[in-house]
Amino acid sequence: MRTATPDERTLVIKMKRASTFTLTWLSNGSSVIVPANFGGMSRKDFFAKPIGAGPFVVGSYQPGQRLVLERNPHYHDPERPYLDRLIHDVVSDPNQQMLRYQSRQADAIEAVPLSLAGQIPENERVLVHPSATIHGIFVNATRQPGNDIHFRRAMSLAIDRGQYAQAVFGGLAVPATSGLPPRVQGSVGCGCTYETGSSRRKPSWHSCPRPGTKVELVVDATTPFSTRAGETAAARLRAIGIDVDLQKLEVQVLVDRQAKGADYALPVLSR
C-alpha cells in the first residue's frame, strides 16, 4: 500500500489488489489520521487530548474512567451537534450500569446485556438493526498450532454457529456470511453454510500441541458479549481436546498484544 497527499484535503491510497474492506475500515473510529510526529508531541500526550474534525472535541479524558466531549465550535454544520456536552463514564459491571440508569445518574446504556434488557421499559429501548458487529476468532497463523490448516479446520468444525448465537446473543444473531455485517459498504454474502462436527467424527488435527501446552484465547473483558463468547468458544474447543487458557483482558491491552503480531494465539474480537 502507498499513500500520497496531493493537497491538504486529499489522501490517495494505492493498493496492490482490490479490497472490499478498505473504505469501511477507514470509516472506523480507530482509523484516524494523525499529524506527522504527533504534531511535535509524544504519542501519550497526543492521545491524552487528541484533535479531530467531528461534532465533538475532547474536553477531558481519564483512561478507563471518564471521557468528556465538548461541542466542536468549528464543526461544518453550525446548527449541530445539538448537545453542548457528552459524558461517557466507564462502568464495567452491567448491574452497576443498570442501577445508574434506573436512578437517572445515566441517560443511556450502551450494549445492554440480554439478561438485564427486560428491566428497561419497552418505550425506552432503542434497537439498532442490523448490528454493525461481527464476532469472530482470529487465529495467529504465524506459529504453532495456528499455522496448521488441520488445526484451524478442527476449530471451525468444533463450533456450531447456531448454538454459539443462542448461547452468546440469546438467539438474536445469525451466523456471518461475510467479513462485514449486512448493509455495510463492501459487504458481500458468500451464500455458504457451515459444517460442524455434530454429524461427523470427532474433529482432529495432525500437529496438535505437546501434552500440557496451552492455547491462549484472549477476549475483551469490558463487554459481557465478548466474555460470554470467549467462555462459549473455550468450552467447545476443550470438548475436542484443545487445552484452552482463557484470558479476559482490557480492550487496549488486547489490541496492543495483537498489534505485536506473535504476542497472541486466539483473540476473540468483534468489529
Image (spheres, helix red, strand yellow):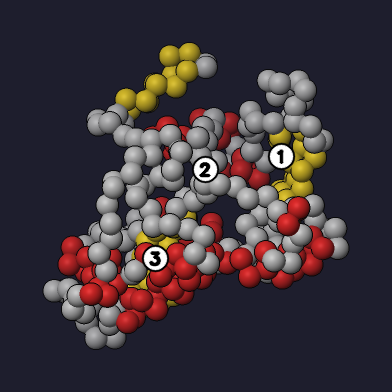
Horizontal arrangement in the rendering, residue 163 relative to residue 103 (left or right): left
Viewer-nearest of discs 1 and 3 = 3
Alpha carbon distance from label 3 to label 2: 30 Å
Label 1 neighbour load within 10 Å: few <14, some 14-19, many 20+: some
User: Percent from the top left, x then y, of residue 61?
Assistant: 71, 48
Q: Is residue 215 above or below residue 49?
A: below
Q: Are marks 3 and 2 in contact (CB under 8 Å)?
A: no
Q: Residue at x 47, y 55 (%)?
A: 270
Residue type of the residue flagged with mark 2: Ser
Question: Going 44% across and 19% down the picture, which residue do you hit?
Answer: 5
Q: Nearer the viewer, residue 56 or 171?
A: 171
Distance Cα–Cα, label 1 vs label 3:
41 Å
Relative image position of residue 211 (x, y in whole percent): 24, 86
Q: State the residue position of label 3.
A: 162
Dot 2 or dot 1, earlier in sequence: 2
Determine the CA span between mark 2 and mark 1: 15 Å
Disc 3 versus disc 2: nearer the observer: 3
Question: Which is nearer the eye, 45 or 248?
Answer: 248
Q: Is residue 172 visible?
A: yes
User: In the rendered structure, which amino acid carries the disc numbered 3?
Assistant: Gly
Residue 94, horizontal then vertical, whole percent? 68, 67
The reply, left or right, for residue 96 in relation to residue 5 is right
Work out whether 142 lies above or below 10. Answer: below
Pointer 2 residue: 30
As shown in the figure, which amino acid type bears the numbered disc 1? Val
Mark 1 lies on residue:
58
Task: Classify mark 2: residues with Cα within 10 Å, few (<14), some (14-19) or many (20+).
Answer: few
